[in-house]
Every structure is written in structure tokens, then in C-alpha cells.
Image (cartoon, rainbow, N blue to C red):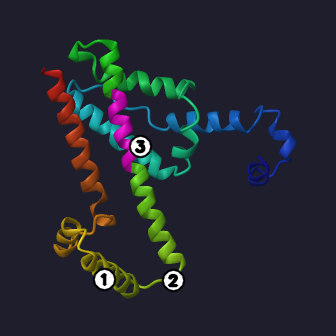
Amino acid sequence: MRRIAKELGVGTMSLYWHVGNKEHLLDLMLDAVAGEDQGAEPSGNWQEDLAEIARKERASLLRHRWKPDVMAGRPPLGPNGLLHIERSLASLDNLNIEPRIALYILATVMTYVTGSVLNELSEINVEQQQAKAGLTDDEIETGMSDWTTNLHRSGLFPRLLRIFGAGIDPDSAETRDERFEFGLRCVLDGIATRLTL
């Protein structure tokens, strides 16, 4: 609260005229972020609609990196959060499924997005730590080479070593979008399969 008051150029106590406490402020912040994207009307193609919702949620989580930590402790019950859920559920209207199943589908997609972004944020954090430490690309590559040599000596990781040997960096910033899209497609295709059973 002190930091926010300082950024706004007001006294800390004056914030309490507008918000009851830090938790209330966090609720308002989450709801404000939920209102950033009003979303498009459903197109009738539920998979593409959910894919677009997932992409926008990923972008929001990456733009507001504090959001995953804050949302873990509270439900999205503000007006913008509820409207976002309502609009997302509308993408499934043409499927004529039980409301419970529609909710499960949306939760599954959002769980994938959140997990994927948490992984991305971990990768970004490592990159930032390396940059903060002043490591050059050559130093990072040498460290990885030494680490890979130790993995090889152990004899325990032949599959991982095949991946590294093929020149694949599982944490490459250049493949983050591709990895996200691959996983999202797997999730949506899996849901489609379940709906035909």
C-alpha cells in the first residue's frame, strides 16, 4: 500500500478511503486486468474461439507477471472477471452440452494456459538472472556444455541427451509460441475427442 501511495503521490492512509485493505486492492487489480479485453463474439467454431481466448489470457499473464501469484488466492468474482467467464462459456453454446461439462472444458483450457505461462515465466526468470549476472552467450554455452558432459558421464539420461544432441533447447525463447500452440492444439483436440464419445 505504501508503494502504491508513493507512486500515486498520495499518503498511504488516503488509499484506505478507496480500498479496505491490500486484499481488496488485489481483487480490484485482478478485475481491472480481466476487463482489458472484452473479447469477440463467438464465431461458431468453439475450438478457434477457445484458442483465441487462451492466447489472450497467455498474453495477459505475460504482460502482468504478478497476476499468477495474486490469482492463486482468490476466485475471479469481480464484474469484469465474471463477464470474461460468461463470454468464454458462450463459445461453447453450440455444442449443446451440460453446463457442468462446459465449465470443465473452460477450466481445462485455462489450467493449460496458466501452467504453460508459469513455465515460460520460469524460463524468463533464468534469462534475467543470467543477464543480471553479466553472463555472455559464450559463458552460458560453456556452462551448458559442461553440464551436458556430466549428464553423459552419469549414463542416466540418454533421451535428454538425444534432445540436446539434436540441437534442441527445450527452454528456447524462440520456440515459446510454437510450444504453446502445440500444447493448446493437443488440449483442444483432446476435448473434441471426448465430446464425440
The answer to whether the residues at label 3 and label 1 have Cβ atoms under 8 Å apart is no
Mark 2 or 1, nearer chain start: 2
**Bounds of the magenta span?**
106-116
Question: Which residue is disc 1 drawn over?
Answer: 145
Say above or below: 21 vs 140: above
Asked whether 85 or 75 is in front, the reply is: 75
* Element class at badge 1: helix
Mark 3 or 1, nearer chain start: 3
| Quarter of the rendering containing residue 150 | bottom left
Question: Which residue is disc 2 drawn over?
Answer: 134
Quadrant in which the C terminus appears: top left
* Element class at badge 3: helix
* Element class at badge 2: loop
Nearer the observer, disc 2 or disc 1?
1
Question: Can residue 41 be seen at all in this image of the molecule?
Answer: no
Question: Residue 147 at what x, y percent from top left?
Answer: 34, 79
| Quarter of the rendering containing residue 189 | top left
What is the number of the mark on residue 12? none
Question: Which residue is disc 3 drawn over?
Answer: 114
Disc 2 crowd rating (10 Å Cα; few below 14, some 14-19, many 20+) is few
